[in-house]
Image (cartoon, grey):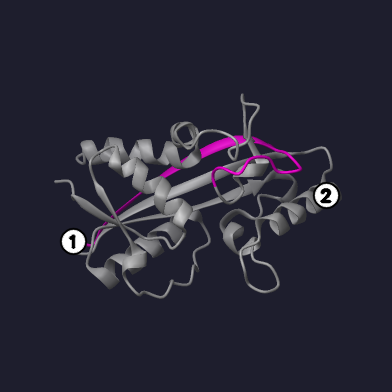
Amino acid sequence: KLPQEILIATNNPGKFSEISDLLKSINIKAIPTFDFNIAEPEETGLTFEANSLLKAKYYGQQTGLFSLADDSGLCVAAMNGAPGIYSARFAKNAAGKNDFAFAFQKIADEIAKNDAKNFRAHFICNLSLFDPKTDFEISFEGRVDGNLIFPPRGDKGFGYDPIFIKDGMNQTFGEIDPVLKDQISHRGAAFKKLVDWLKNPNL
């Protein structure tokens, strides 16, 4: 039986609104972790799936609520797949603040240094569900491939969206309508798998 409410295990407002919109489409209410005063867990996993499960379990156990966590990141070919699971940390500046302009510049510099003509990259999103009442857990992963572009373009989306153009498109994720992004993004792909499962959990 589907929960009517799911706790979204993230402190990232951009992610929360994206996931909340996606859940709304299947009539599930998203509860933000901002409503609880919980310190963030340390992400010690070495894969997107491990970190996503770690967050879902942590918040689920702390609140007793059915939890959905997302771990996602940008994997740059010329950087051997970095920043990958470290994408959020990679964007922190010397003062420890999120600074994506700083992150974009670091990526541009690394590409120029390592493999100047290779702008290939992909986004991965892993979504995990955890039910603290039964210890049930399951994960779904989505991926989208494309190229990076500098300077960044667009002020929609969040994170690395302004430097990523999906294969077959000519606008960045920062330029396209968020509704369209939800349909074609790595998070959208993982979410489709999640929704199919929610509709038929016996699969």
Residue found at the very far front of the displayed protein:
155
Query: Disc 2 or 1, which lies upstream in sequence?
Result: 2
Image height check: is 169 above or below 57?
Answer: above
Residue that carries the numbered disc 2 in the rendered image: 114
Q: Residue furthest top?
A: 168
Give the residue pinned by disc 1.
134
State the CA–CA distance, disc 2 to disc 1: 48 Å
Residue 69 in which image quadrant: bottom left
Q: Is residue 26 magenta?
A: no
Residue drawn at (40%, 53%) of the image: 16
Q: Assess whether residue 144 is covered by the magenta stretch.
A: yes
Q: Amino acid at mark 1?
A: Thr
The residue segment tinted magenta is 134-157
Q: Secondary structure under badge 2?
A: helix
Q: Nearer the viewer, residue 92 or 137?
A: 92
Kindly indicate the quadrant of the structure image that contains residue 150: top right
Mark 2 residue type: Asn
Vertical arrangement, residue 4 with respect to residue 52, above or below: above
Residue 65 disc label: none
Q: Nearer the viewer, residue 77 or 188?
A: 188
- Is residue 80 rendered to the left or right of residue 85? right
Q: Position of residue 198 (x, y in %)?
A: 24, 41
Give how far across and how far down residue 57 sits, in percent: 33, 65
